[in-house]
Amino acid sequence: MAHSNGVVLQLTSLQSRATETVVGVRVINGREREVNLNRFNNNRHGYLVVDSGERIYLSPPPGNPRISIQAGQTLEGELVFLGRLPPGQSAVLVLNENASTDNRLATDPGFRINLPLQELGAAQ
């Protein structure tokens, strides 16, 4: 998914484990400024939300809690969420809740991405 500020977020994998859900990502920062995918340095503005409204919150990496990507750089890694996705439901990945999903000047871009849970169910 491309944000209008020049950041591209690609999902590379999705794993639902016993106690966590892991989303593999590649983030390309095409801006001339640093961007943050977890703007408030906590785990309440990044989560997975399922059909029932339940939220599975992000566990930000200790070495980069704001998930900052320097200008012109690419970040490849895994986002870990504290809980297992319930079977048979759809889910949406939310990063930077309430942030703009289309502001070309945003340094904290908002993302809302539907997750391909049908593929996850087939892989289990």
Image (spheres, rainbow, N blue to C red):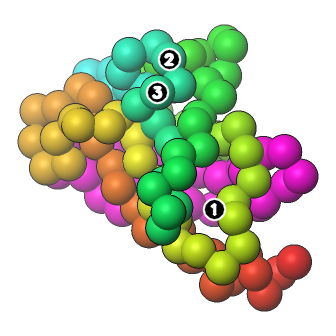
Residue picked out by circle 3? 44
Label ID, residue 12 = 1
Residue 78 on the magenta span: no
Residue 19 on the magenta span: yes
Label ID, residue 42 = 2
Q: Is residue 32 above or below residue 100?
A: above
Q: Nearer the viewer, mark 1 or mark 2?
A: 2
Q: Is residue 15 above or below residue 21?
A: below
Residue name at image x 66 percent, y 79 percent: 88
Q: Secondary structure at mark 2?
A: loop
The quarter in which the N terminus is drawn is bottom left
Label 1, label 2: how far apart the Cα atoms are: 24 Å
**Horizontal side, residue 23 vs residue 68: left or right:** right
Q: Which residues are magenta?
A: 1-29
Q: Position of residue 44 (x, y in %)?
A: 46, 27
Q: Secondary structure at mark 3?
A: loop
Residue name at image x 69 percent, y 60 percent: 85
Q: Amino acid at mark 1?
A: Thr
Q: Position of residue 14 (x, y in %)?
A: 69, 62
